[in-house]
Amino acid sequence: MSDCIFCKIVDGGIPCDKVFEDDDILAFKDLYPQRPVHLLVIPKKHITSLATATADDVLVLGKMLAKANEIATAQGSPEGFRVIINTGRVGNQEVPHLHMHIVGGQDPVGPMLKRL
Ligand code: 5GP
Ligand code: ZN
């Protein structure tokens, strides 16, 4: 079995607080929320990161974006939100299964990046 924690969440081996799923994607609450609404949207298929995604992944990546507003609205951020996809070492990606953060539920959600 894969060591990937998000693959284990997809398989049900690790529990999650699920908020949406269809055949291709799963959305659940982040375990350590950084805003009142903090969700993760992942492809059910293992894709390590945006750096390894290919043309075969276009549909699932599009679906993740296309569903974001519906998911954010249902979870309490109907007036907007931010999506973040940390990628690779430079992007501080901690979990090596592609995931899109949806953060919101706070008006405004905060500055895009901390100034260096
Ligand atoms: P990254 O830094 O890779 O973009 O984000 C990984 C996110 O996954 C973090 O926000 C972290 O809180 C969340 N996370 C890590 N392990 C788990 C887990 O087992 N369950 C859930 N729901 N979230 C997790
Ligand atoms: Zn995985």
Image (cartoon, helix red, strand yellow):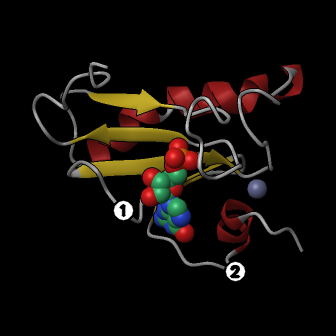
Which residue does the image show at 21% across and 35% down from the upper left?
78
Picture coordinates of residue 64 (x, y %)?
58, 34
Looking at the picture, which amino acid does disc 2 mark? Answer: Gly
Which residue does the image show at 71% across and 28% down from the upper left?
50
Q: Earlier in the sequence, mark 2 or mark 1?
A: 2
Looking at the picture, which amino acid does disc 1 mark? Answer: Tyr
Q: Is residue 29 above or below residue 3?
A: above
Which residue does the image show at 41% across and 50% down from the upper left?
39
Q: Residue furthest front?
A: 116
Locate the N terminus by quadrant: bottom right
Q: Tag 2: Cα neighbours inside 10 Å, few (<14), some, or many (≥20)?
A: few
Marks 2/1: CA distance? 19 Å
Image disc number at residue 32: 1
Is residue 5 toward the left or the right of residue 112 in the image?
right
Q: Which of 1 and 75 is in front in this view?
A: 1
Of discs 2 and 1, which sits in the foreground? Answer: 1
Location of residue 89 (image quadrant):
top right
Is residue 103 toward the left or the right of residue 29 in the image?
left
Disc 1 within 8 angstroms of ligand 1 (CB): yes
Picture coordinates of residue 19 (x, y %)?
43, 58
Picture coordinates of residue 81 (x, y %)?
29, 30
Which residue does the image show at 80% across and 50% down from the upper left?
46
Q: Which of 72 and 49 is in front in this view?
A: 49
Is residue 61 toward the left or the right of residue 19 in the image?
right
Ligand 2 found in image quarter: bottom right
Q: Which residue lies furthest to the left in this view?
A: 107
Q: Tag 1: Cα neighbours inside 10 Å, few (<14), some, or many (≥20)?
A: few
Residue at the disc numbered 2: 13
